Image (spheres, rainbow, N blue to C red):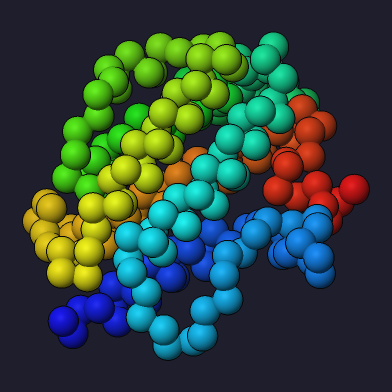
Amino acid sequence: MRLKPFAAVLVLTAAATLSAQMPMQRPGGMGGMNMGPQVAPGTVLDPAKSMDFAVSQLETLWTNAAKAMPADKYGFAPSAAIFVPGQATKYEGVRTFAQLCTHTIQANYRYFGAVGGIKPEVDVAAIGKLTSKEDILKAFAETFAFAHKAVANVTPANAFESVRGMQTRATTFAGAIAHAEDEYGQAVEYLRMNAIIPPASQAREM
């Protein structure tokens, strides 16, 4: 059982990375995200519960960002036209906002499926063809429901079992969070290019 502390540290690190991107909770619980129950440093946590909390944080980030983008901007992608004349740019083939979303949703299924040892009951390939805000928000809800189901299967005993080569459930979970955060960072830029303050930043900027 010596793996327990290491599993907790890895999962807490992923959750802390997410928390750093969110507005801190203010007194009375207003103006910020719920950071969860207070836990004394050094407490060994159930990895499934800690992972589930991190998934919830990620779900809030992405769902709110996807809701904030107007439906008629889901086809938006950066282009040379937004830069000053003569500036060297190459934006051919850059993903639209909708494609950023669907790519993230598809990757979530791959990563979290490996974490929990389960398979999605949806056509993951078909998700890449979604373009409407309504359909993509529905797909986000489904992929995060899948993620919550997957991390519930992680235990102190299996957190560091290999799922592929040197990748374990715990390290694959860390990869899932890192990838989704990377894509979220790009989505934030898309929002700002359209003069939209990302919901996670509104408490600080408004």
Say which residue appears at 57% left-offset and 15% top-offset.
Answer: 134
- In the image, residue 115 lies at what x, y percent? 24, 50
Visible in this render: residue 128? yes
- In the image, residue 34 lies at what x, y percent? 65, 59
Lateral position of residue 141 relative to residue 110, left or right: right
Looking at the rendered image, the quarter that the N terminus falls into is bottom left
Lateral position of residue 35 relative to residue 129, left or right: right
Visible in this render: residue 181? no
Identify whether 192 is placed above or below 44: above
Q: Nearer the viewer, residue 79 or 16?
A: 16
Identify whether 206 is placed above or below 90: below
Say which residue appears at 33% left-offset and 69% top-offset.
Answer: 46
Q: Within the image, what quadrant is residue 169 found in?
A: bottom left
Say which residue appears at 20% left-offset and 79% top-offset.
Answer: 3
- In the image, residue 152 lies at what x, y percent? 30, 52
Q: Within the image, what quadrant is residue 133 found in?
A: top right
- In the image, residue 82 lies at what x, y percent? 74, 26
Q: Nearer the viewer, residue 58 or 157?
A: 157
Lateral position of residue 94 relative to residue 20, left or right: left
Q: Which residue in the rendered view is the most extreme toward the right?
A: 206
- Numbered marks: total: 0
Lateral position of residue 78 relative to residue 54, left or right: right
